Amino acid sequence: MTKKLVMIGGPMGVGKTSICKKLYQMVNRSVWLDGDWCWMMHPWKFSKRNKEMVLDHITYLLNNYLKNPYFKVVIFDWILHQENIYQDILSKLSESRFDLCKFSLVAEREVLRNRLLHDERDEQVAEDSIARLKCYDTLEAIKINTSKLTPTQTAIRIKDLSQIENLKDGQFMIRMPRNQKDWNMYHQIRIEEIFEPYFPGVPYNGEHPSLKLSNHFHYCLWLGRQIIGVCHIELLGDGRAAIRPIAIKKSFQNQSLGSQFLKLLEQKIADLGCHLIQLHANPKAITFYERNGYIRMPFPENRQLAIEVIDMGKELSI
């Protein structure tokens, strides 16, 4: 297994430390380095010499973590608001082989301001952090808006997108699409198993806004090294989550895989901190959901549904 280096950037107040603390505890044989630990000095003094010293410390530690055969995942967080900072660090890790995953954590301006003021930072610190948000727009990193996510939910998204688990023959698991090939299969299954049979004539939108919203978690169901199903979870707030239509490829239907898929989704929802699942069930699927512990439950939403559905839900035991 090739090691993974997960680099997580974001402005002060976005929640990097809280998120990384959750993340490294979720990942077996991982280690976490916060770049700010190498700046722990009093009084704090920024200078060219001190900056070079800090970079030397960071790269020394990262190299040792990457060389250590015990660690499989190395997590590093820092402000990382400029591409040259990445390059300064990565250029000194050339002795180690690893897969790189880069993330930029951002938040809405007022959310960021409120977090910093709540932490008793002064107004100028908040303004400086907000001004830095625009730096992350042009970085080649996966962006995650943390405004509506808890640290645990953000850590799960990073873990899923990093694809830390290797796929094995016969293994049954869910994970987020990471590359265009995965996304193409995600859309193909939705078109063939949901839109064509149930919404004929309705154009499929492969750029739907929900694909980029931070409270929507899109998953593929993998059997070994092939995608056989898709679904997505929407976090509704107040401990509630919605499961949007589940789809299994036709050649894998009627093999009890839908129930296994549902159990994996329920576990993911529980991990995300939710206790109540709600959904709109196709009337033909009522028996399937009842067999898996779902009951009829009102699920009013402010949108029009194109087909007749039955509202159902399930309280999780967490």
Image (spheres, grey):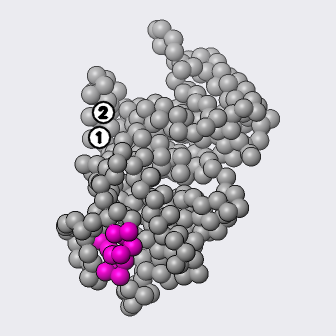
Q: Is residue 134 visible?
A: no
Q: Residue furthest front?
A: 291
Q: Give the tally of numbered discs.
A: 2
- Considering depth in this image, is 52 or 27 the residue closer to the camera? 27
**In whole angstroms, how far apart are the C-alphas of marks 2 and 1?**
6 Å
257 within the magenta span: no
Question: Label 2 belongs to which residue?
Answer: 115
Q: Are marks 2 and 1 in contact (CB under 8 Å)?
A: yes
126 over 176 or under it: above or below:
above
SS for callout 2: helix
Residue 3 placed where, x, y %? Answer: 71, 42
SS for callout 1: helix
| The C terminus lies in quadrant | top left
- Asked if residue 91 lies left or right of residue 260, the reply is right
Looking at the rendered structure, the kind of residue marked 2 is: Arg
Query: In percent of the image, x 62 and y 65: which residue is there?
Result: 223
Residue 305 placed where, x, y %? Answer: 26, 78
- Considering depth in this image, is 30 or 253 the residue closer to the camera? 253
Q: Residues within 10 Å of mark 2 (few under 14, many from 20)?
A: some
Query: In percent of the image, x 54 and y 65: which residue is there?
Result: 221
Looking at the rendered structure, the kind of residue marked 1 is: Val
What numbered label is drawn on residue 111?
1
